[in-house]
């Protein structure tokens, strides 16, 4: 038995080494593959909370520039001291302080050694840079090394690096608690070289995520033997070391731009398969192909191995997690393009590691709680959203520092659509002391787009959606703008262009920019191209400005049109005066005029907000009359107000602007319609509820007397 | 005499005083109307003519978003508007408590005149009791609750999973509620002592109440908690019935309104029941 085990170990070790050799023998970077390659060996020192790592990096200069240096992200230094950009920004933040590092819980990364393949030492040239305004000169999350000679276009540079990282107790998105670790942004990682501009390598900011180049990864992770490990990429082999009581796991993945992993003895590991042709019916494939106007073969979904690492305390929610992941794999795959990797790993974040709800290539963290009602779509929403980032951020890899809306906004929009289609409305997840209130009270149910809109309309005037992440007014503005406002604007855009056109836009954008780094301009270009319309005005008003959008109906009046107008008239060459009395007498005599009354309905429309619709995108106006008939009209919406007149034999009952609710971003939908006869019952109902609340508050206040 | 007998006597006392309940309800209702009126006019202005008004019956995020956008600058003013009436209502309750306990102690049929005479008679004394209660509340909830909660906090802080955190949090909440009940019960007995002995000296009454409660602590507290549980049961029934009501229609609105006011009446009745049972217990041991 022992011999068999030894043979097995030997074979596993050979397999791991073989995989590394295979990866490093792939064609030269920048020709067929991504410009970067990593092989990393990392060992977790559980007692000291340290990571001891070695890293081999090869980078190919795909630009036409001679590149004299290389900039690295050293994200763990964000938790090194209070001079880091993250902690300084967090202190300045009045709305939201997210990083609270206590004594003895600091984290850092030390680059012990960095040299070229030929042994020339780059460490003496290493320096920290902090270039983002306002400056935080004490920050050490970006390091520059200078090469002895510039890297010529097309040339490849190979570096070797040794580093030691202290895992922060529970930092932003990474950390440990007791025996559990979530390890992200942990290794020295080059920025993205942009031709003519140099390295795009921002500091770790409080309100920003990440940006990196596509790369091939091989990572060997050594942890205590009782730890369950989950990681980006595909597990290629495991080598236990009985003497040291550790195990080394080797993971590999090509064409991803980050690598995260987790280790904990508290995990239960569950694996299931997503079989494309079992999850999607032939009719669904055909419908998708028709809708997207692409060949049937292009919408077929591949099989994917799904792995869930879930905390033992949440084991009852295993099926719930997989159902949401299947839904996401199917919807994102059909709508935007097939999932291109063989694996996806879903992590129920280790308790108190501050790592929930975060995305990494081929791995994401979800987030749930012990007493979660089925009607509350909370783990589902997080799972779908974070998996969705595999598409928006993972595959279409925009710069999250500079244009975060491109992944967060698009993905929030996508999440809302997937949730709505698969689950319908979710219950508001209110709880008291960890106990869900839905068991006791009738809580509201909602679609994501409704809550997104509620946040979006209240943030419009703070910052444009397209703003560098660290330049937002505060964390609230960053979040509400790049997630909710962007998503609400995209829902509005879908309303304007139609669901099918929007679906084609998203598919075209996704497949066109897969494994690339698109910008907002690229997205707008795709919108214009696929829709066949110039939609620049839409983005100018709602993405690049802080303009509030609010059109409404100010008033509606229906008055009887006088049959005999008052005043002086020329009749057959004679001047006749029509008085009130005379008009009344004439009206009495003319029976027909009593039966055929004409009413003039005047609808006054107003543009309350600063944002305007485009010249070619007028607003629809619907007027409903007492007999049920309707008049549809349009307003170009360019002025501050407009008046529409209708002459009908009946009075108007209701006037509505944007009756189809296309303009979801409208910040006051309550004024979009005007009923001539007020509906008091609704007002009384709301007021009665408020009265009841006040009565109870008064009695509660009185009880302390 | 057992708790059930005392509660039975208390319920009889409540039933003997429908007029008192009605007056207290009218005061609460009118006061509530005064406070809620500006909000009614605001809702009427913005939603009266809007088709979106139809959604006001239930919370939805479309009109809620609109309202936050429109009124977020008004929130501090609204908070202020609610705070001032709340403070006035505390004073009013101090005034009314005199009438409630005075009439219950008298045992005669409650008349409006007699009720308000007692309100006026005891207001000064009860106001001093209220002043005395302020530092006690501060001491208990500023210090004692934290002290008693500390082990639970520590337990939650070192927890390896969610369950200890939830349990600790709920235990802390329970402790807070139990301490609140203790403080409220104690100050009730001070008022009862002042009325029963027709005393004027609050500190002497406080000492007497302390002695009274101290000597039969569990009996007094058990009784108080028993009545409290009855009130919680009534609240649970109210929530259950409200959840079962249909959401729309004038009948549903009418039923909902009547039910809500019935609950307010039940709240007021429970307050009288607290005093009546405490008075009964007091009389058993301090005849």
Image (tube, grey):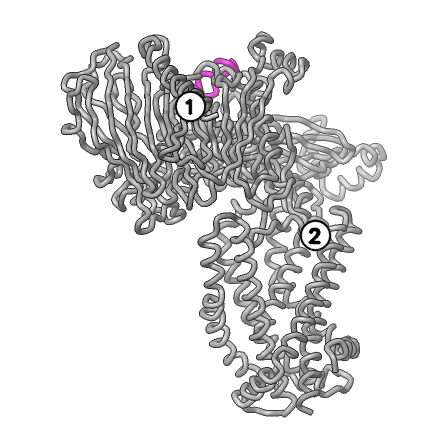
Where does the image place residue A109, in percent across and percent down from the top left?
A: 27, 36
The disc placed on residue A55 is none
Distance of label 2 from label 1 (alpha carbons)? 77 Å
Among numbered discs 2 and 1, the one appearing first in the sequence: 1
Please indicate, yes or no, whether residue A374 appears anywhere in the rendered image: yes
Neighbours of disc 1 within 10 Å: few (<14), some (14-19), many (20+): few
Where does the image place residue A427, in percent across and percent down from the top left?
A: 63, 42
Please indicate, yes or no, whether residue A542 appears anywhere in the rendered image: no
| Chain that bears disc 2 | A
Where does the image place residue B1, in percent across and percent down from the top left?
A: 74, 83
The residue pinned by badge 1 equals A6
The disc placed on residue A685 is 2
Nearer-the-camera pick, B125 or B77: B125
Does residue A501 belong to the magenta stretch?
A: no
Neighbours of disc 2 within 10 Å: few (<14), some (14-19), many (20+): many
Q: Residue at x 21, y 18 (%)?
A: A117
Judge whether B204 appears above or below A79 on screen. below
Judge whether A494 appears above or below A591 on screen. above
Judge whether B90 appears above or below B41 on screen. below
Residue depth check, mark 2 versus mark 1: number of the one nearer the observer: 1
Nearer-the-camera pick, B73 or A280: A280
The C terminus of chain A, quarter of image: bottom right
């Amino acid at each position: 038995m022992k011999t068999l085990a030894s043979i097995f170990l030997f074979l596993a070790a050979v397999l791991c080494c073989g995989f590394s050799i295979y990866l490093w023998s792939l064609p030269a970077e920048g020709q067929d593959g991504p410009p970067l390659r990593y092989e990393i060996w990392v060992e977790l020192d559980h007692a000291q909370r340290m990571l001891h790592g070695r890293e081999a990096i090869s980078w190919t200069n795909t630009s036409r520039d001679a590149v004299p240096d290389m900039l690295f992200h050293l994200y763990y230094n964000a938790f090194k001291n209070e001079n880091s950009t993250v902690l300084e920004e967090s202190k300045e933040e009045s709305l939201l302080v997210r990083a609270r590092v206590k004594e003895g819980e600091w984290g850092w990364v030390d680059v012990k050694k960095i040299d070229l393949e030929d042994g020339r030492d780059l460490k003496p040239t290493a320096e920290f840079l902090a270039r983002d305004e306002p400056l935080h000169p004490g920050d050490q999350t970006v390091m520059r090394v200078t090469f002895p000679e510039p890297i010529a276009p097309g040339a490849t540079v190979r570096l070797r690096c040794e580093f030691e990282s202290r895992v922060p107790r529970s930092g932003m998105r990474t950390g440990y608690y007791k025996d559990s670790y979530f390890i992200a942004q942990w290794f020295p990682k080059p920025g993205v070289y942009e031709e003519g501009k140099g390295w795009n390598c921002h500091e770790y900011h409080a309100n920003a995520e990440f940006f990196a180049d596509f790369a091939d990864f091989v990572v060997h992770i050594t942890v205590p033997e009782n730890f369950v490990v989950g990681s980006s990429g595909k597990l290629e082999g495991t080598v236990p070391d009985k003497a040291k009581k550790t195990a080394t796991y080797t993971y590999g993945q090509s064409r991803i731009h980050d690598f995260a992993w987790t280790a904990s003895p508290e995990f239960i590991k569950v694996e299931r398969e997503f079989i494309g042709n079992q999850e999607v019916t032939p009719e669904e494939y055909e419908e998708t192909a028709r809708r997207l106007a692409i060949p049937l073969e292009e919408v077929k979904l591949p099989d994917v191995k799904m792995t869930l690492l879930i905390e033992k305390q949440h084991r009852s929610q295993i099926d719930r997690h997989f159902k949401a992941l299947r839904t996401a794999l199917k919807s994102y795959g059909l709508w935007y393009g097939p999932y291109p990797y063989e694996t996806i790993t879903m992590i129920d974040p280790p308790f108190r590691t501050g790592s929930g709800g975060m995305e990494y290539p081929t791995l994401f963290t979800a987030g749930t709680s012990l007493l979660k009602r089925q009607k509350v779509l909370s783990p589902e929403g997080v799972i779908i959203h974070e998996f969705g980032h595999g598409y928006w951020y993972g595959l279409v890899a925009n710069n999250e520092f500079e244009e975060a809306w491109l992944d967060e906004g698009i993905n929030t929009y996508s999440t809302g659509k997937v949730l709505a289609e698969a689950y319908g409305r979710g219950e508001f997840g209110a709880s008291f002391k960890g106990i869900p209130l839905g068991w006791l009270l009738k809580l509201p149910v909602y679609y994501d787009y409704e809550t997104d809109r509620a946040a979006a309309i209240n943030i419009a005037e703070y910052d444009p959606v397209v703003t560098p992440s660290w330049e937002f007014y505060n964390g609230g503005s960053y979040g509400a703008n790049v997630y909710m406002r962007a998503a609400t604007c995209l829902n509005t855009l879908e309303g304007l262009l139609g669901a099918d056109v929007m679906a084609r836009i998203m598919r075209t954008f996704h497949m066109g920019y897969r494994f690339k780094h698109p910008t907002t301009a690229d997205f707008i270009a795709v919108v214009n191209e696929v829709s066949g319309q110039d939609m620049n005005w839409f983005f100018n008003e709602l993405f690049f400005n802080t303009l509030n959008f609010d059109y409404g109906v100010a008033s509606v009046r229906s008055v009887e049109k006088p049959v005999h107008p008052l005043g002086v008239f020329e009749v057959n060459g004679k001047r006749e005066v029509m008085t009130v009395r005379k008009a009344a007498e004439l009206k009495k005599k003319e029976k027909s005029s009593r039966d055929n009354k004409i009413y003039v309905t005047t609808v006054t429309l107003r543009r309350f907000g600063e944002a305007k619709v485009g010249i070619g995108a007028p607003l629809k106006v619907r007027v409903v009359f007492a007999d049920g008939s309707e008049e549809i009209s349009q307003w170009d919406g360019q002025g501050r107000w407009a008046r529409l007149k209708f002459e009908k034999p009946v009075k108007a009952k209701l006037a509505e602007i944007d009756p189809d609710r296309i303009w979801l971003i409208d910040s006051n939908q309550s004024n979009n319609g005007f009923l001539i006869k007020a509906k008091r019952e609704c007002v009384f109902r709301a007021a009665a509820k408020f009265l009841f609340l006040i009565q109870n508050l008064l009695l509660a206040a009185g009880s302390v007397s | 005499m057992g708790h059930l007998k005392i509660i039975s006597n208390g319920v009889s006392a409540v039933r003997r005083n429908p007029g008192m309940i009605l007056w207290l309800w009218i005061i609460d209702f009118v006061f509530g109307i005064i406070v809620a009126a500006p909000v009614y006019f605001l809702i009427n202005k913005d939603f009266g003519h809007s088709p979106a008004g139809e959604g006001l019956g239930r919370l939805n995020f479309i009109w809620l978003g609109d309202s936050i956008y429109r009124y977020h600058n008004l929130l501090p003013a609204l908070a202020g508007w609610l705070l001032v009436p709340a403070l006035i209502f505390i004073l009013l309750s101090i005034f009314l408590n005199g009438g409630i306990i005075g009439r219950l102690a008298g045992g005669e049929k409650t008349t409006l005149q007699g009720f308000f005479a007692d309100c006026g008679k005891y207001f000064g004394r009860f106001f001093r009791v209220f002043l005395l209660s302020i530092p006690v509340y501060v001491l208990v909830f500023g210090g004692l609750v934290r002290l008693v909660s500390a082990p639970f906090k520590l337990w939650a802080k070192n927890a390896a999973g969610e369950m200890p955190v939830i349990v600790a949090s709920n235990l802390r909440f329970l402790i807070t509620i139990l301490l609140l009940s203790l403080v409220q019960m104690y100050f009730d007995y001070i008022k009862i002592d002042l009325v029963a002995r027709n005393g004027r000296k609050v500190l002497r009454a406080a000492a007497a109440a302390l002695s009274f409660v101290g000597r039969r602590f569990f009996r007094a507290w058990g009784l108080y908690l028993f009545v409290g549980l009855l009130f919680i049961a009534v609240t649970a029934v109210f929530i259950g019935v409200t959840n079962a009501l249909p959401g729309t229609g004038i009948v549903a609105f009418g039923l909902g309104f009547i039910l809500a006011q019935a609950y307010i009446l039940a709240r007021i009745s429970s307050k009288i029941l607290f005093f009546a049972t405490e008075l009964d217990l007091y009389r058993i041991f301090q005849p």
